[in-house]
Amino acid sequence: MSTGATAANQIGYVITPPEQATLSVAGTAERFPVHRVYCVGRNYAAHAVEMGHDPDKEPPFFFQKNPDNLIADATEFPYPKASEDVHHEIEMMVALKSGGEDIAVGDALDCVFGYGVSLDMTRRDLQGQMKKLGRPWEIGKAFEMSAPAGPIMPVSQVGHPDQGEIWLKINDEIRQTGDLNQMIWKTPEMISILSTLFTLQPGDVILTGTPSGVGPVQRGDLLHGHVDGVGELRVRVV
Ligand code: MN
């Protein structure tokens, strides 16, 4: 037997495998393993307008962050390199326990494990440059620690929130406000549409878009996010 041989049930790796990205789950020590992170763009009409777009004409569009961009139980957000204009976007996150392709809207909520509060932190200057050039958004969106997140609240505890306030304060001053019922594409629709484009998997996480009021953060700021019935997130920019 060669020294590199391993039993079929004992895989050898040429480098140390990366750690599985996880989120915490309220009420249990067990973790939620993250597969992919899908983000929905311009999903609140007022935010689409503030970004210079007509909300009525646009079908939903998606981009991704990396699973390990999530900061589970975040208390700090390190101001990232390569940007002078980092923006907050408060968002409800949806965590899937099952997936599939071409999921009907009426079946979509059966895929949901739970909901949480998250931030889609954005290097707006880099995103703007990429938009202007018609290039992908990754350098603006999918950077290290770009998605501070709270614990996932299981559906068994919070149901399927589809209305209620979503807001973000900075240093106790309100910056973003909206209501989940203002989402242009609702949670079941987002899951259904995503499943026509990708094979959704258990462990997939969806960031459902942000209400209006996005703006820059500074080191030292305390970001306090809230989603009715889902929870709170308090993150210091360091
Ligand atoms: Mn966003």
Image (tube, grey):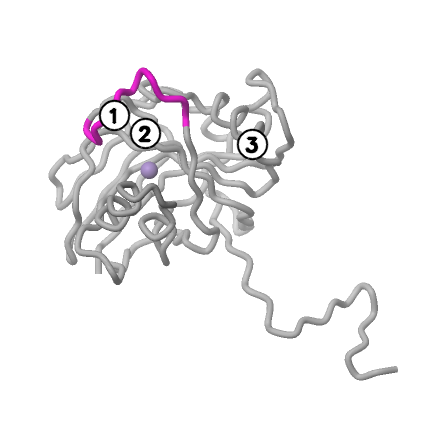
| Residue behind mark 2 | 42
127 within the magenta span: no
Using residue 154 as the reference point, say whether residue 75 is left or right of it.
left
Find numbered disc 1 in the image and state the secondary structure of the residue it sits on. Answer: loop
**Residue 151, quarter of the rendered image:** top left
Q: Residue at x 62, y 36 (%)?
A: 199
Between discs 2 and 3, the one toward the N terminus: 2
Residue 182 vertical position relative to residue 141 in the rendered view, above or below: above
Look at discs 2 and 1 and give the one toward the viewer. 1
| Residue behind mark 1 | 53
Residue 157: % across, % down: 48, 30
Q: Residue at x 37, y 34 (%)?
A: 92
Measure the alpha-carbon separation of dots 2 and 3: 18 Å
Distance from mark 3 CB to nearest ligand 1 atom below 8 Å:
no
| Residue behind mark 3 | 197
Magenta segment: 50-60
Q: Amino acid at mark 2?
A: Arg
